[in-house]
Image (spheres, rainbow, N blue to C red):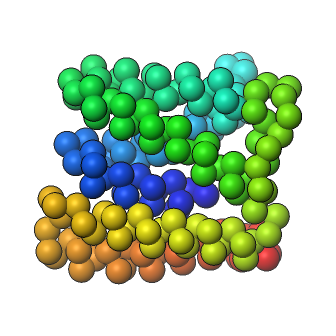
Amino acid sequence: MYMGHFAVALGARRWLRPLPLAWLLFAGIEPDLLDVFGSLVPSLGVGDASHSFPGIIYAAIAVAALTALIFRRTGLALGAGLLVLSHVAVDYLTSWLPLWHGGPHVGLHLYATPRADFVLETGFIVLSLALYARSPDLRRPARAGLMAMAVLMIGLQAIWNFGMAGG
């Protein structure tokens, strides 16, 4: 659900304007980045911990602390931490994830139903870009590009759901 995570980060821009957009995008997909890094370096033993309840709490605290150190604003740090937490909250809609290492799995597992996942993710994209469009610091020419961004994001989501998954 990369497009959905990016969309949530874009939507959060309205409230977290002082943070660079790249930082918001990083916070929105941090658990997936940790997952990929853990796959590349198996000795780290990350496994499913990146998306488990304890793992996401640790990640949110780490990103919030890093945000506080770099940007020196508690509110922005809290927002970045919440953005990390939103990642797993949204993933529980689309995936089937363990609550903790060796614990029960939960989630709607919409990846198994590509059409339902596509509808949910498209809704996230549209809602989040609508929120992003209302960001006071977004210039008029950039607003015009939001439609192209929406088409690109929804197109990539369609490829994920129907092209790659064969749904």
Identity of the residue drawn at 41% across and 52% down: 9
- Residue 106 is situated, as x and y percent measured from the top left of the image, at 79, 44
In this picture, residue 71 sits left or right of residue 88: left
Residue 70 visible: no
- Residue 103 is situated, as x and y percent measured from the top left of the image, at 84, 28
Identity of the residue drawn at 34% across and 41% down: 23
In this picture, residue 52 sits left or right of residue 109: left
* Picture quadrant of residue 20: top left
Locate the C terminus and report the quarter of the image it occupies. Answer: bottom right
Residue 137 visible: yes
In this picture, residue 141 sits left or right of residue 129: left
Pick the front one: 29 or 75 = 75
- Residue 158 is situated, as x and y percent measured from the top left of the image, at 62, 76
Identity of the residue drawn at 36% across and 45% down: 24
Locate the N terminus and report the quarter of the image it occupies. Answer: bottom right
Pick the front one: 123 or 5 = 123
Q: How many marks?
A: 0
* Picture quadrant of residue 44: top right
- Residue 7 is situated, as x and y percent measured from the top left of the image, at 45, 60
Residue 27 in the image: above or below residue 167: above
Identity of the residue drawn at 27% across and 26% down: 74
Residue 125 in the image: above or below residue 73: below
Residue 14 in the image: above or below residue 24: below
